[in-house]
Structures are given as structure tokens and as C-alpha cells.
Amino acid sequence: MAKTVDQYFDDLRGTRVWRSIFRSGTGSSTLKRALAIQQNVFLHLFSTKVRTRMLSFSATWYLGTLTLGTFLILVATGIPLMFYYHPSVPQAYADTKDLQFVVSSGLFLRNLHRWSAHAMVLLVFAHMFKVFYRGAYRTPREFNWVIGVILLLITLLLSYTGYLLPWDQLAYWAITVGSNIASAVPVMGEKIHFLLLGGNAVNANALLRFYVLHCMLLPLAAIFFVAIHFWRIRKDGGLYSHSSEPATVRAVAGAKEVR
Amino acid sequence: MTDELKKKDEVNRRQFFLKLGLGSLGIAAAGTAAFAYQYLDPNVLYEPSPVVNAGKPDRYPLDSVTLDVNSGIYIIHSQEGYFSLSAVCTHLGCLTTWKPELGIIACPCHGSKFSVSDQGKVRAGDKIEGPAPKPLPWKRIWLNDDGDLLVDRSTDVPPTARDSFVRV
């Protein structure tokens, strides 16, 4: 009798190599499935069990997951873009044009990076509005809201630093205006402006600083805080549900007592 | 020495090392912050010189306003002489432009407008309208030995200063 595809997968999961990597073992018992989540370095951030109702579209509109999706697209398109882009004054604009008109699929990658960036900012705000209007920021989730605000700032800074990199007139003046806003900080504004640009005007140093921030520091910071953000969902009792609110629980308990 | 004293002594030693350790870490952290700040603060800048050679004065006809896009300054030849205004908007740093049909300097970014001549209370460089918080600053201007106009973009001068005008 021929084996089914599932049986091939079961055989694979039974091999010594597979078992050396994934220790939870085969089988679909509740324990095995819980172990598969709990013993995976990536999945252990999440709860081993989630209410089916919380996975429905109406509960979250999937806004947080969609934001993560755009972030992953941005990483996946940004790294190939780095192979052709030199963050230097004579080359940056020419490289951007090459990506647009010469490099195979360069136009596709660049546009995907650009539109995903816009989508990510939009989704972050949508996600925050959804959380806010549902009241999902309240105890015990206040700290995760704060992490969310930090992630909002990182998203906006990523957007801002990426804006300069094409090194065209729009980029140049947008960063001139934006960095001058930093000068408005009392007392240390001028110094912040100077350190941000690495000089007195948007120039070679500013381009390199924004490149390093855009491709290294800010993505790493985003990954760090996203990890905490996801882990806190589990620690704060899973996704927000109205029925688990202390007030709702008390009201339900009160109604039972009266009866 | 009583047992009680000895006990107290041990705790103090532990606290001493704890404080010593935390203090060392604190000093190391402060040192790292100071080094990081110094490292990120450039000591040498490869930026264009703040002193601009604007050429011979006869390049600029009487009652003319000339913008040098590359250096971001205006050379204005008025009845009283030659003077130079910064072309960088005092609002958020955009490059302003001279509007000959309106006789004013205007910023394309957020609509600030500046005067180029004295009209009543309004001095040259003063804001006429828009969000700009300050007038366009006057820049130090002088003639070198070859008879070229030089402008120091890094030095603001009051309109009444001796080196705010060149009279040829």
C-alpha cells in the first residue's frame, strides 16, 4: 500500500536528526501540541493555548499581525536593496536610479519596500486605535501599551531615516525641515541637530548616519521591542477579551449570586 | 569581638563590595557615555567654507537682488551699497527665493515672506508674513584686495554694523 503524504511527514518527524532538533516528538495529543509551542525558541513567546474566539477577525482585525507582516516584507526587501546601494553623496542618487531602471526586479523590490513602509505606518496607527477603543491598554496591559508607543516611535524614525536615502531634492529638503524641528528642543536643540546630521547641514555625514540608523540600529531595536511586545501578550493573560475584564467577571458573579 | 558585631561586620563587607561593584559599573557606564558622545561629535567637518567669494561688485546692477543657490545667500545692491542676506528660511531651513514680480523674498515650504528693503518700520530681511520666527540675518560682507565681494556665512551682523554694507 502506498504511503500518504502525512505518513511521509510522520516518518520525517521520527528520524533521529529531526528529533535532535525538535524534542516535542510526534503525535497530536494536547500535551504534544503544547510542547511544540513551548519548546520552540520563536513560538514560546506566544501562549500555548488561545481561545478560538480571539482568533476571529473581529477580535483584533489582525492589525498587529499585519504590522509584523509588513515589517518582515521590509526586512526581506531592504536587505537586497542594500546590495546595490552605496550611502555616499556621489553614488546614492545614481544607485537609486539604477535600482529603478537597470537592476532586474529592482523596481519591484524598491516599490514593495516603499509601499510596505507606508502600510506599516498606517497599520501601526490602526492597531493603536483598535487597542485604544477596545480599552485593551488597561491593567494588566499598561506596560505593553508603553512598549507599543516605543514601537510607534521606532516605526516613525525608520520611516524618517529611510526618506533621506534616495538623496533627491524631496529627500534633501524633507530632512532639512525635519532636522530643523529637532533644533527647536530647548537648550540642547542645536546640539541634537548637529549630532543627528554629523554636521551643520544635510551632507555626506548625515547620509551615512541615517543609513546606519535605518539599516542597523533601528531594525535591531524594533526586533528587540517586538519580542518583548509578543512575550507580554502571553504574560498579560493573552489577547484582550471583554469577558475576562475584572468588571465583567464581577458583574457575572454578582448576577449569579442574586439568582 | 562578640558574635553580633562579627555578623554586622560581615554584612558591611558585603555591602562594601556591592557598592564598590555598582560604583565601578556606574563609572564605566558614565565613561562609555562620554566616549560615545565624543566619538559621535565630529571634530573635523568636510563642509564648504563659510566664506563665499561673490565676485566683482559690478556683476550686481543697482536695485538688484541676486540669489546664489549653492551658498544660500542673497547679494543685494541697494542705493546705500551692497549687503548680503541669508537665503535660508529661519522657520525650518528651506532655501527661499527672490520674487521680482512681487519685490519680496518668499519661502516655498511654508509660505514665509521677507522684505528686501527698508519700508517704514520694516527693515530689509524682516518677515512680512508667515511662520518664520526671525528675520533673515544679515551676513558680514567686505571687499578683498582683488576687489571681490566676500561674504562670511557664519557671521550674522546687525544691519547697522560697519561691515554689513560695502560701498564702492
Image (tube, helix red, strand yellow):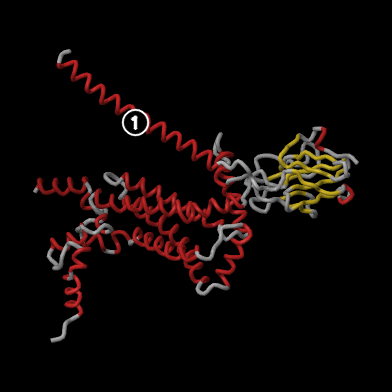
Q: Amino acid at mark 1?
A: Leu
Residue lying farthest to the bottom in this orientation: A1
Which element carries disc 1, helix, strand or loop? Answer: helix
- Furthest-front residue in view? B1
Locate residue A222, reporting x and y percent.
40, 53
Quarter occupied by the N terminus of chain B: top left
- Of A233 and B36, nearer the camera is B36
Q: Position of residue A172 (x, y in %)?
A: 61, 55
Between A50 and A208, which is closer to the camera in this rendering? A208
Residue at horizontal 83 percent and vertical 38 percent from the top: B165
Label 1 sits on residue: B22
Q: Residue B162, located in which quarter of the rendered image?
A: top right
Q: With B140 as the anchor, is A48 left or right in this view? A: left
Where residue B115 appears, x then y in whole percent? 76, 44
Relative to A122, is A138 on the left or the right? left
Q: Residue at x 19, y 58 (%)?
A: A49
Residue at image position (80%, 47%) is B53
Left or right, A61 with reference to A40:
right
Looking at this view, is B96 or A215 the one in front?
Answer: A215
Mark 1 Cα-neighbour bin, 10 Å: few <14, some 14–19, many ≥20:
few
Q: Chain of mark 1?
A: B
- Name the quadrant containing residue A58: bottom left
